[in-house]
Image (cartoon, coloured by chain):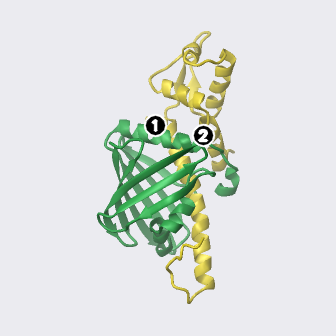
Amino acid sequence: MPLKLTTPSDTEIHIERVFDAPVAFVWRAFTEPEIVKRWLTGPPGHTMPICEIDLQVGGKWRYVWSMPEDEMEAHGAYREIVPLEKIAHTETFCQWPDNETTVTTAFMEDAGKTTVLMKIKYDSRETRDAILQTPMEQGVEMSYCNLDELCA
Amino acid sequence: MVTASDQLSVTFSALADPTRRSILGELSKGERTVTQLAEPFDVTMPAITKHLKVLERAGLIERGQKAQWRPCRLNAQPLQAASEWIELYRAFWEVSFARLDDCLDEMQNQANTNPNRKSQSKGNQ
């Protein structure tokens, strides 16, 4: 099923997606490192060798992605946690140590399916454009896969 | 009809080239002629034209109708002044979420076949 991406303002991106699973499973997939590193990797060929999550208010998280010719790292801290409902955290990519974004992820279950709504807020439009261009470029630089498999 | 996965492939392909990304970066500052776009690169005009065609096919740029050197502009999204990175960002999450679908299927299958097993993941995948 396709995701819904909207930009309610110049500094915000909203992403909404429905998953065919109860919220208990989706919550674990977003918060347990061993599961996160299996899917939050973008285009094939990336792996996530490091995934650290200290899931408590003030706790820190850190992801390191490995690509054929490069590496990318992001980290942040948790601001708010409501189990099975909501996570608010900060996010900084190593390439732009001065630019911090705030992400709020909400989980809503209905009839065995879970809707995840991520709200990503940047401190300025330039930050948003700069951050989103380069990591995604690196992701794209490598093999663009047989997407039919994944998107079937 | 172009499927979502077709469009993702086209978008990825168009953007997986540093010259094309530089062209898009230049166009984000305003319209340019083909000559202007070719200037910074040590490639031939036909090579630049080929890049522009790839970007045009991916819907990321469009050509004006002026004279010999046609200006290229970024395609503006209907509802927002988004540029190609929005599509790239969307593609990243589409692919990641597709993988998450598989993970969730696996998790539920495991839970169904092992009803007495604790729900905590041992992380042995």
Q: Amino acid at mark 1?
A: Ala
**On screen, residue A73 above or below A137:** below
What numbered label is drawn on residue B95?
none
Tell me the tag on residue A141.
2
Of residues B121 and B52, the one drawn nearer to the viewer in this rendering:
B121
- Quarter location, residue B110: bottom right
Above-or-below relation of B76 to A45: above
**For chain B, what colour was chosen?**
yellow
Is residue A152 visible from the viewing direction of this image?
Answer: no
Query: Where does the C terminus of chain A fall, quadrant-wise?
Result: bottom right
Depth order, front residue of A59/A121:
A59
Q: Secondary structure at mark 1?
A: loop
Residue A59 percent across, percent down from the top left = 33, 64
Q: Are marks 1 and 2 in contact (CB under 8 Å)?
A: no
Chain A tint in image: green
Q: Quadrant of residue B64?
A: top right
Number of disc labels: 2
Q: Amino acid at mark 2?
A: Glu
Q: Is residue B70 above or below residue B20?
A: above
Q: Where in the figure is residue A75, as x and y percent of width and height? A: 39, 54
Nearest the viewer among A102 and B32 is A102
Name the residue that disc number 1 marks.
B82
Identify the subunit bearing mark 2.
A
Q: Chain of mark 1?
A: B
- Residue drawn where x is 36% and y is 64% of the image: A87
Horizontal side of B8 relative to A17 (left or right) equals right
> Viewer-nearest of labels 1 and 2?
2
In the image, residue A8 sits, relative to residue A54, either above or below, namely above
Q: Quadrant of residue A119?
A: bottom left
Q: Position of residue A55 (x, y in %)?
A: 37, 68
